[in-house]
Image (cartoon, helix red, strand yellow):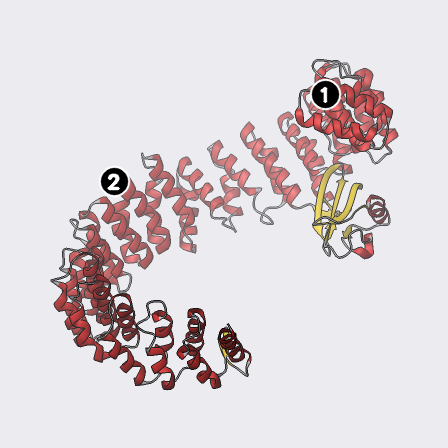
Amino acid sequence: MIKQRIILILLAAVLLAPVISYGQTVVSASKQDELIAVLKSADATRKAKADACRLLSFIATKKAVPALASLLADEELNHMARYALEPIADRAADDALLDALGKLKGKPLAGVIGSLGVRGERRAVKPMAKMLKSNDAMVAQAAARALGNIGDAAAAKALSGALAGSAGYSKLTVCEGMLRCAESLGDKEAAAIYDQLRKLKDPHQARAGGLRGAILTRKDGLDLLKSYSGYSKDYIMSSAAVQASAEISGVKVTRALADALGRLPADNQILILGALAVRGDAAAISAIAKAAKNGDKTVRIAAIEAMPPIGDASAVPALVDLLDDSDADVAQAAQANLAAMSGKKVDAAVMAMLAKGDAKTQLTALDLIGRRRMTNVADALLKATKDNDESVRTASIKMLGDLPGEVKFGTLVDLLLGAKGSGEIRAAERALSTTCKREAKPSAGKVTIRKAVYRGIEGGGSADVTKKVAKMVADGAVSIEASNSNLGDPAQGIVKQLQIEFTANGVTHTETVREGQTITLLVGATPDAFIEELRSALAKASTAQKLALLRVLRAAQGAKALEAIRTATKDRNSEISSEAVSILCGWPSAEVLPDVLKLAKTASDRKVKILAVRGAIRLIPLQDASVDKKLAGFKEILPLIQRDEEKRLLLGSLATVPTSDALELAMAYLDGASTKNEACFAAVAIAEKIGAKNAAVADAMEKVLKATANNDLKKRARAVLNKAR
């Protein structure tokens, strides 16, 4: 044990001494003697010796060779000894390995053979040539690989001579060695090796590698490429030839591949089409287009897919011709790949289709314009809105709304006023609504903070900062930074996040950011000029157009848009007034609640009354008002609620008002068969927010537990009940 400790201390001293750095490992060059001593020690463990070899691999000199060589016969340490010997820049290391070559057997011998190959020791060629015939397959295979690494003419000759007498995996390693030799030799010698390999019957890897090398190393390689790329009976060799073509430039190679297309089976054609796509040579377009026209479907689609990578505009007519193909998959592939092609010439071809084609071609062109995200097309699209075909006009109008900055808003309004068919009107409505939303400018709007929580991301403290954030907004802030200086520090030493639930112009949003980031509480406001153009158009519009304009105003929102909607509710045309009432009842912000409540109370039309009641139920929780005022609003409309649908809607909204009165109101619907489930959910949601000990809450939860069959809801109700008792 004492000796073992000494050896470990010695190794530690080596590691801790002044050092030379070799990548991740550092060791003192002056410590070679201590490491050699470890190797010679009869008391050192195998691990200690292996560690010493590893360290010697960085610093060993001729001096370490004898000690390392003494371990070559050891099956367990042979690998580490060679690991240290291989980098030594002295002939002594070669001599030691050569000496071992004649003394070892089995795995240690195979290892030494490999090391001599790594060092490229040509003196080992002759003995290794004999070992190629060894009865020990491991030794024979190691010799084949090592000769390949040495790679001189003598090594190549030895391997070539052994090829005929080898079989199975040993034959594969001989072929591998020959391929490695060929990479080191001149073209003439290499070509002879490649020819020998490509003419074999097996293994296929060697045949394919031989053909590749034969094509690339000889002057007549193109002829060989032509011969094999068009050879349909042997896919492996055909594939090898085609793959080799990727390493040869020039239009002659492209044409050789293209010429072979028509006379090969489908799999071979697909292989060549892939190679032509990679080459990107426009000289192949004609042959590819021909392959795309008829024949095997998989070949046709592969040909279509080969055109975009080449990227030449000469492919456009061929793809356009295929857009009407009787095979839907081929036609779809043509359209998708035409869209994928880049370049101004392709854009010009698409625009020509729009200008001169029939309706079907024009619609395809419009689809391609959208897919390709083409710009500067507004004039052409405006011209197409006057086409004789309604489908072309409709598609053009629709697309104009997707061109940011290219079309004036007034032009879109004029298109709506000039639209005749329902499809055109809907397209113009969509274009206008899209533009209103896209061009909306940031505005503080009417923002109400509903809930704000600042908490640790991975546990820790949490703080309700709703009042703090609401005050910041009331003081004019439009953005809130998630920081301790703003909100306090509820979780010291822990990264926090801020979550804010707020309504902006009546629309509810929830945003969450990490500490140091900012939540912006801005809403989009449609420019007043847009709304004025829409309002002016109402006076000129037909009924169908006016209905569309009202829906666009709903998308635009804002006070002036709402004013126009209110005016339209009094229109003499019942169709227009009905649409305006529907929009008013569906308005996203609570500012219309008085109007909606009035309609709910006074409307004689049953449909209008139902819309108004539903609208009021939805709008009451959106008010920037106290909980008591919201509850009063619900009580005000209770007498107007007749249908089960509105009762269930009421229960959903009551869940946002956490008061005992709201709980009592929800419990009143517990006995109704059609409202029981919603009443249970509403009661539990309200009770969870009330919290604390409360007899009314406890009583309500006991009733919920008896009424509901929902296991998750029962679990929540029991949790509330335990706190409320």
Q: Residue 616 location, x and y as percent?
A: 78, 25
Left or right side of 357 for 283:
left
Q: From the viewer's perspective, is 713 left or right of 208?
A: right
Q: Earlier in the sequence, mark 1 or mark 2?
A: 2
Q: Is residue 525 visible?
A: no
Answer left or right for 161 relative to 577: left
Q: Position of residue 442 (x, y in %)?
A: 72, 48
**Residue 618 in picture, x, y percent from top left:** 75, 28
Identify which residue is drawn at 62% across, 39% down.
Answer: 432
Label 2 crowding class (10 Å Cα cut-off): few <14, some 14-19, many 20+? few
Residue 253 visible to the viewer: yes
58 versus 591 height, above or below: below
Q: Residue at 82% across / 57% down in the picture?
A: 485
Which quadrant holds residue 59?
bottom left
- Secondary structure at numbered mark 2: loop
Q: Label for residue 296?
A: 2
Three-letter amino acid code at the position of disc 1 = Arg
Comparing 612 with 157, the one in front is 157
Give the residue number, with chain letter if any, for mark 1. Answer: 648
